């Protein structure tokens, strides 16, 4: 099943399902690198709209502090479960979910 540019997927593993999917961690990315994705979401999540734009930030939030949890650095609480969200940056991408 192909995915559409800007479509979100949720996974329960630690790696991108395909190189054309970007982690929804609020990162700033270049418009020239992802023009189709910029056309789809623009500066909805931030960025200057001239040279860059931001990806959505769907990192988990700590129920204790209300702060974002940096899952990349392993600061997830023991026993806490989370999913990672990815956004499709190139239409027609077929993720390998095996």
Image (cartoon, helix red, strand yellow):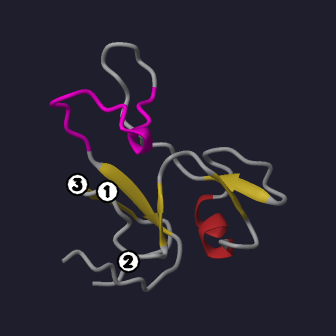
Left or right: where 33 falls relative to 55: right
- Nearer-the-camera pick, 73 or 26: 73
Q: Residues within 10 Å of mark 1 (few under 14, many from 20)?
A: few
Secondary structure beneath label 3: loop
Nearest to viewer (mark 2 / mark 1): 1
Residue ID at (70%, 54%): 53
Looking at the rendered structure, the secondary structure element under dot 1 is loop
Q: Label 1, label 3: how many angstroms apart (C-alpha)? A: 7 Å
Quarter of the figure with the N terminus: bottom left
**9 part of magenta stretch:** no
Q: CA distance from mark 3 to mark 2?
A: 18 Å
Query: Which residue is tagged 2?
Result: 3
By secondary structure, the bulk of the magenta-drawn segment is best described as: loop
Q: Is residue 44 above or below residue 74?
A: below
Quick one: label 2 or label 1, which is nearer the N terminus? 2
Looking at the rendering, the stretch of residues picked out in magenta corresponds to 68-82
Left or right relative to 60: residue 50: right
In percent of width and height, residue 96 lies at 28, 80
Q: Position of residue 78 (x, y in %)?
A: 20, 28
Image disc number at residue 14: 1
3, above or below 41, in the image: below
Viewer-nearest residue: 17 or 93: 17
Q: Residue at x 50, y 43 (%)?
A: 57
> Which image quarter holds the C terminus?
bottom left
Please report whichever mark, 3 or 2, sits nearer to the chain's N-terminal start.
2
Horizontal side of residue 80 vs 21, given as left or right: left
| Element carrying mark 2 | loop
As drawn, the label of residue 12 is 3
């Amino acid at each position: 099943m192909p995915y559409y540019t800007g479509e979100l997927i949720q996974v329960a593993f630690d790696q991108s399902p395909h190189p054309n999917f970007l982690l929804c961690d609020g990162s700033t990315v270049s418009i020239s690198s992802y023009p189709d994705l910029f056309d789809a979401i623009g500066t909805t999540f931030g960025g200057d709209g001239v040279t860059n734009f931001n990806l959505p930030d769907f990192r988990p939030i700590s129920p204790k502090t209300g702060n974002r949890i940096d899952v990349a650095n392993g600061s997830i609480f023991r026993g806490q479960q989370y999913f990672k969200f990815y956004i499709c940056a190139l239409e027609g991408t077929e993720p390998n979910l095996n």
